Amino acid sequence: MSTLYAKLISLIEHKITPMAGAVGQQKYVTSIRDGFITALPFMIVGSFMLVFIFPPFSPDTSWGFARAWLQFSLNHREALMLPFHFSMGIMTLFIAVGIAASLAKHHNLDPLTSGMLSLMAFLLVAAPLKDGQIATDYLSGQGIFTAILVAIYSTELYAFLKRHNVTIRLPPEVPTGVARSFEILIPVLAIVVTLHPLNLFIEAELGMIIPEAIMSLVKPLVAASDTLPAILLSVLVCQVLWFAGIHGALIVTGIMNPFWMANLSVNQAAMAAGQAIPHIYVQGFWDHYLLIGGVGSTLPLALMLLRSKAVHLRTIGRMGVVPGAFNINEPILFGAPIIMNPLFFLPFVLVPMVNATLAYFALKLDLVSRVVSMTPWTTPAPIGASWAANWTFSPVIMCFICMAMSAVMYFPFLKAYEKQLLDQEKENLAEHGDEALQSV
């Protein structure tokens, strides 16, 4: 067993860790992650409005308060939907600006200028005029992949032109703001003369604009991202990286966010249209079923530590249970520790994978409501799961089932580790006793 563990640690240290570190620090991955973080507050507020507009009551309810809420929502639907349309409905605008602003820092460019350039480039290809009106079809989740590519392209083109001094330079006496305006003229022109003709050409040849063409290309990937193998693979990568001390969640969410946002957008459109919610694997599923108490679903473990016979574990439990309720579990990970602790490797990796399987089939069989709303990742799991699924109760039950399963799986490994620590405590006590006698 020890030989197998040594080989596993060697593989993680020499193969997986360097590769994961390189991916985690890659400028495009970090920029995409930062772009989604920038857009997150707008999307959370927009999602909350959607839940308010479609309250979790049956249309034939006889409860007076529920009937009044439903009727109010129906009478003022258009006005109430406006905040949603200008947050979740145009999420790609925020994402495009955020990605470009973050990527600009890698090239020592002005983030605001780069963000505005990306915004113009995205609108140029994703918001064509139809009957004198701007089309908004691809300003929501359907345009996410286009926003990512356009933000990277526009910023890299700006950096290339500046690196090769293809710019308009004004004398030092000219105010900085005016000089910057002239400096961006050539990049703006370059964006227009490259993207606009390309968009027109693709539309003429394929009958679709760039965002539509990109979505048709990535559609198999988006579909595959909503399957159980995709869930298990992403969880496995996250857990193995975290066990090695690398923030695997940042890497996995950076890769999965575009797929999650595209699927969430479809779910929200289906709810607004009164249709069945199609997608399972979105951000709320990851946060509230797989990361209960943090990566590894360690909240049940933290609660069990409170009753441990080992002083060390009881202390860590008291330190970690409150942060764990809000999905922050570094005290448990590094204090117990779980990181690089061979006794906890199996449950740490398998617990969220088992919970993922249980939750996936529960949602697949329509036993549990699916996610339609963005929630802060720090929301306690039962509350966050219910909030994400339009305040239905079935996700709460699912959360408690996952917590119970986590506790059952962690328990024997915790007991083995506890016995090990108790033996060490007895040895330390005996040594200190002998030293005391010798000193006397």
Image (cartoon, rainbow, N blue to C red):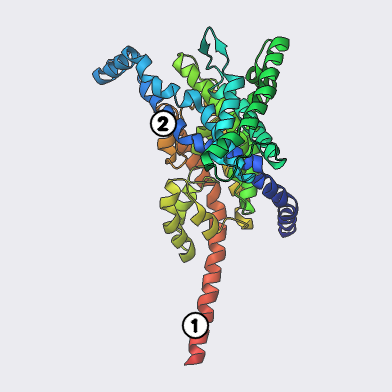
Regarding residue 170, the answer to whether it shows in the image is yes
Secondary structure found at label 1: helix
| 174 vs 140: above or below | below
Task: Tell me whether the residue at label 1 lies in contact with that at label 2, contact meaning CB atoms closer than 8 angstroms.
Answer: no
In percent of width and height, residue 89 lies at 48, 23
Q: CA distance from mark 1 to mark 2?
A: 61 Å
Q: Residue at x 53, y 14 (%)?
A: 135
Q: Please tell me how crowded label 1 is: few (under 14), some (14-19), or many (20+) other residues with Cα within 10 Å.
A: few
Residue beneath disc 2? 45
Q: How busy is the neighbourhood of tag 2: few (under 14 within 10 Å), some, or many (20 plus)?
A: some
The residue closer to the viewer here, 94 or 258, is: 94
- On the image, the x and y values in percent for residue 24 come to 65, 46
For the point 58% across and 39% down, the residue is 33
Rendered location of residue 326, percent (x, y): 43, 46
Residue 288: image location, x then y, percent: 48, 37
Whether residue 230 sits left or right of residue 4 in the image: it is left
Q: Amino acid at mark 1?
A: Gly
Q: Which residue is mark 1?
A: 433
Question: Mark on residue 32?
Answer: none
